[in-house]
Image (spheres, grey):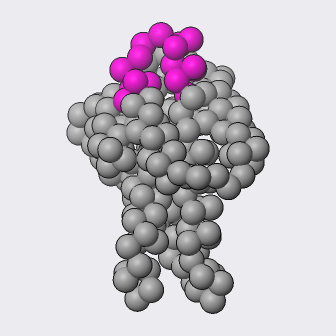
């Protein structure tokens, strides 16, 4: 904990990871609401939405694997995080199924690129003797951000609407990245 706290680059990466999970994963959490309320679909519609997001994630993972380590990885992660936040907000306001599917595909791609790039940067930045401990803190922030973000966005969606919750989440995520 002391190492992460006193190492600004690692602390920033851990914080970005936690915020990405907290603000970005509600997109997947609220998909059943959008399938039912926006697109008038049941389980099949929800499955289709998830499939497009998953297909995008596969493409994003392949892109990151193909690129490997490259200069300006941090800048790319921030730029893609900005795009991801914008895509989340765009999905929230879209009422056209074909557009929403495309936005989900791109959002899935961006989420995977951001997540993979951040975890790579943490591993490249942490020294060998600290890497395991740093990764445990990183994963705690990332994995902890998902359910906490789901709780917060679900509460906001219940108080306002799922659309509002995702617009806020996506907007904040883009703002954090900028």
Percent x, y of residue 107: 53, 33
Magenta stretch: includes residue 95: yes
Q: Is residue 56 above or below residue 5?
A: above
Question: What residue span does the magenta drawing correspond to?
Answer: 89-104
The residue that appears at 58% across and 86% down in the rendered structure is 130
Task: Name the image quarter holding the N terminus.
Answer: bottom left
Q: Is residue 51 above or below residue 125?
A: above
Percent x, y of residue 168: 28, 38
The residue that appears at 41% across and 79% down in the rendered structure is 7
Overall secondary structure of the magenta section: helix
The residue that appears at 47% across and 59% down in the rendered structure is 17
Total numbered labels placed on residues in the image: 0
Left or right: 127, with 140 as reference point: right
Magenta stretch: includes residue 178: no
Left or right: 77, with 119 as reference point: left
Percent x, y of residue 112: 61, 45
């Amino acid at each position: 904990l002391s190492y992460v706290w006193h190492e600004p680059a690692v602390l920033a990466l851990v914080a970005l990871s936690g915020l990405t999970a907290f603000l970005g994963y509600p997109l997947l959490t609220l998909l059943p609401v959008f399938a039912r309320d926006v697109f008038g679909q049941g389980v099949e519609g929800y499955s289709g939405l998830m499939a497009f997001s998953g297909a995008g994630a596969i493409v994003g993972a392949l892109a990151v694997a193909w690129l490997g380590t490259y200069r300006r990885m941090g800048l790319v992660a921030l730029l893609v995080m900005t795009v991801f936040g914008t895509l989340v907000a765009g999905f929230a306001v879209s009422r056209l199924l074909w557009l929403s599917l495309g936005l989900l595909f791109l959002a899935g791609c961006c989420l995977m690129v951001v997540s993979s790039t951040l975890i790579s940067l943490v591993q490249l930045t942490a020294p060998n003797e600290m890497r395991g401990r740093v990764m445990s803190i990183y994963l705690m922030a990332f994995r902890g951000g998902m359910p906490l973000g789901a709780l917060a966005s679900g509460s906001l969606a219940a108080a306002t609407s799922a659309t509002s919750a995702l617009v806020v989440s996506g907007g904040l995520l883009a703002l954090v990245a900028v």
